[in-house]
Amino acid sequence: MAAPQPINVEDLNIYYGDFLAVEGVDVQIRPRSVTALIGPSGCGKSTFLRTLNRMHEVIPGAYAKGKVEINGENIYDSRVDPVNVRRRVGMVFQKANPFPTMSIRDNVLAGVKLNNRRISRSAADDLAERALKGANLWNEVKDRLDKPGMGLSGGQQQRLCIARTIAVQPEVVLMDEPCSALDPISTLAIEDLIHELKQEYTIVIVTHNMQQASRVSDRTGFFNIAGTGKPGHLIEIDDTDTIFTNPANKETEDYISGRFG
Amino acid sequence: MSTTDLESDSPAPQTSSMRGSGRRVGDSVFSYLSVGSGLLIFLTLAAVAIFLTSESMPAVIASQEFSGTSEFSLIEVTLPLVYGTVLASAIALVIAIPISIGIALFISHFAPRRLASGLGYMIDLLAAVPSVVYGLWGGIWLVPKLEPVYVFLNTYFGWIPLFAGEPTAPMRNLASASVVLAVMVLPIITAVSREVFLQTPRLQEEAALALGATRWETIRTVVLPFGRGGVVAASMLGLGRALGETMAVLMILAPGATFSLHILEVGRHNSIAANIASKQAEASGVDMSLLIFTGLVLFVLTFIINALARWIVARSGPKS
């Protein structure tokens, strides 16, 4: 496999109908590292995250203009099928959302079985084991793979969702506040997992928790909004240490030092 | 009302202002009213059941099975009617369910928003059309239009027992009655299914989409499993309507009383409801009692169907 390339975002404007929600994002996201996005509520960081796998446009009326290059290919090119983008850019949501009618095993394999891809029983078992091990969940569930996924605890469900995401072997994993509904111990388990995942995947994580951003990420981007009804902007992005100790921008400094937001 | 409230509520001047029996007239009046309304349902149901049972007794007593002497048999009269009723309803459901699910999914997941709401409105309108109108439409317009279809089915698929036999025009057969019944139950099944599909948690659908599911795969992995219980309930509601439907069947079907599987043949079947409606005006004595007995059978039948529906829904409902 060729050396992973960064994600290139150029002049991205994101809309909900007529409303311009995020304006003029230019950023390079480094491969096989963790990039955290922070900022006050409503600043557009989640909206931006969802444009990286074209999930933004599943909301009626929502669309994005601009360029997002993943592996040198603009995913907003008219010839690109969003379904194929989402197979290469996985996503973990704010609230764990395993499929309620499926067992743990079927949840992990759900993405693999889509689009009529055939897979043998033993290959499926191997893949499920590998994905669950990758999500640090294997030891907890190996004896009850056929039990429903909804029977797990909140933190386990979220790791199940991560296993489901990495089972399709994406290049990028997007995480939209993955720990906001979890207790501190489960949060720690997910954060440890993020450290391991970045060996293989490019990770972009949106978080409300600045300590979390400083713990898990290599680079941190700060989004801000001038006021209600105004578009959000990416104010600055830099190495996480720099952002938290010596940010270039006054707004960033105000935010991380807790003067607002 | 309000004056009595005030009188009984105002405390006697000497007693502490916080004392009281804890019962207020308004509360108890309301509670009696609502308990009474609840009881009324049971009383009505009991009244119907008692009427049907007691009025059908003369026929039961006079029947061959009971007296051993009479010339008519309860079973011989009733069973073909039950058969016709269930067969017509079952075929109607087989036609209506897939189409309803299709329409419901189109409205909930495929149609542009404006078209979806217009279509939903039309479906509701379709449910409000009186059955006698469907009867007229079916008997006069639809039956001749279906004739070539039946001839085709009979010629090329005659080896399937359902389409065997000798269909003769006018096609006032069970198949025509079933088609019209299907049109009549379509709106209710569609409306309920659409509501259930629309309630699929957004997060579940996004989970599937984010894994790279196409729209159809999202529906298959998330929407349909979530809506299964609701679709079953909707179908049972439709079945209830089809079983009891009278006018449309009466106006379309040329009656008969056999256990024939040949739904294209005319004069082979009849339904309980249509049979009662066609004969009750002239019937008296034991004949009337016999009609009431078939009514009792229909009553019990719909009761069982409903109980079954509830059981299925309770068993297959979403677990989350």
Image (cartoon, coloured by chain):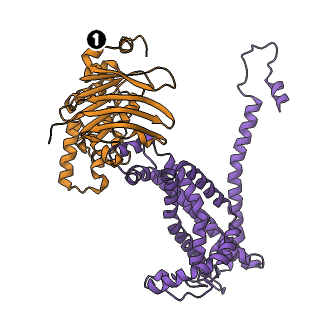
Chain colours: A orange, B purple
How far across and how far down the image is residue A201, in percent?
22, 35
Is residue A189 depicted above or below B149 in this figure? above
Is residue B207 depicted above or below A225 in this figure? below
How far across and how far down the image is residue A174, in percent?
31, 34
Q: Residue at x 65, y 58 (%)?
A: B125
- Tell me the kind of residue under disc 1: Asn
- Quarter occupied by the N terminus of chain A: top left
Q: Which quadrant of the structure image shows residue A63?
A: top left
Q: Residue at x 57, y 83 (%)?
A: B258
Q: Is A203 situated left or right of B306 in this image?
A: left
How far across and how far down the image is residue A151, in percent?
35, 40
Q: Determine which residue is flagged by label 1.
A: A246
Is residue A194 depicted above or below B275 in this figure? above
Q: Nearer the viewer, residue A25 or B268?
A: A25
- Quarter occupied by the C terminus of chain A: top left
Q: Which quadrant of the structure image shows residue A119?
A: bottom left
Q: Is B4 situated left or right of B294 in this image?
A: right
Q: Residue at x 52, y 26 (%)?
A: A229
How far across and how far down the image is residue B169, in percent?
61, 87
* Res. A204 visible in picture: yes
Q: Which quadrant of the structure image shows residue B62?
A: bottom right
